[in-house]
Image: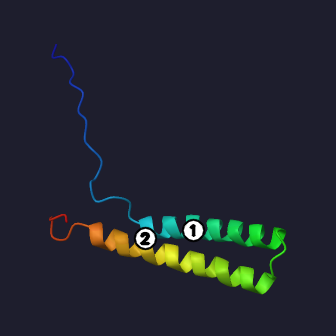
Amino acid sequence: MRPRRLVWNPPDASGPRRSLRDYAIVYAGLAVVVAIFGIATGSAVGSTVVIAAFVFVVATAWTGWRLRRTRPEDGQGR
């Protein structure tokens, strides 16, 4: 009887398919935390919501730029 061999296939190196969406969900949650903190400390609701939206947009744009920059193109990484 032949001994069985363990075959291990490494995960696909391309990364998660929806990584920007996942980051956007996390950043939306952080923006909500910023808004709640701002409102709880007595800041104006309007300015707090604008700041939270700004934090969300900047963080998501930065992550999108980073992911696009580090994504391998035609099998070549940067």
Residue 31 on image: x %, y %: 64, 71
Q: Residue at x 66, y 80 (%)?
A: 51
**Residue at the spot 25% in from the left edge and 41% down from the top edge:** 9
Q: Residues within 10 Å of mark 1 (few under 14, many from 20)?
A: many
The residue positioned 45% from the left and 78% from the top of the image is 61
Say whether marks 1 and 2 touch (CB < 8 Å): yes
Position of the C terminus, as image quadrant, is: bottom left
Residue 45 x %, y %: 80, 82
Vertically, is 16 above or below 20?
above
Q: Under tag 1, what secondary structure? A: helix
Q: Quadrant of the N terminus?
A: top left
Foreground residue among 67 and 38: 38
Which residue is tagged 2?
A: 63
Name the spot of residue 48 as percent of width and height, x first.
73, 79
Residue 65: quadrant of the picture: bottom left
Horizontal side of residue 38 vs 23, given as left or right: right
Instruction: Tell me where residue 70 sits by quadrant.
Output: bottom left
In this picture, residue 41 sits left or right of residue 56: right
Q: Which mark is residue 47?
A: none
Nearer the observer, 9 or 15: 15
Name the secondary structure under disc 2.
helix
Q: Which residue is mark 1?
A: 27
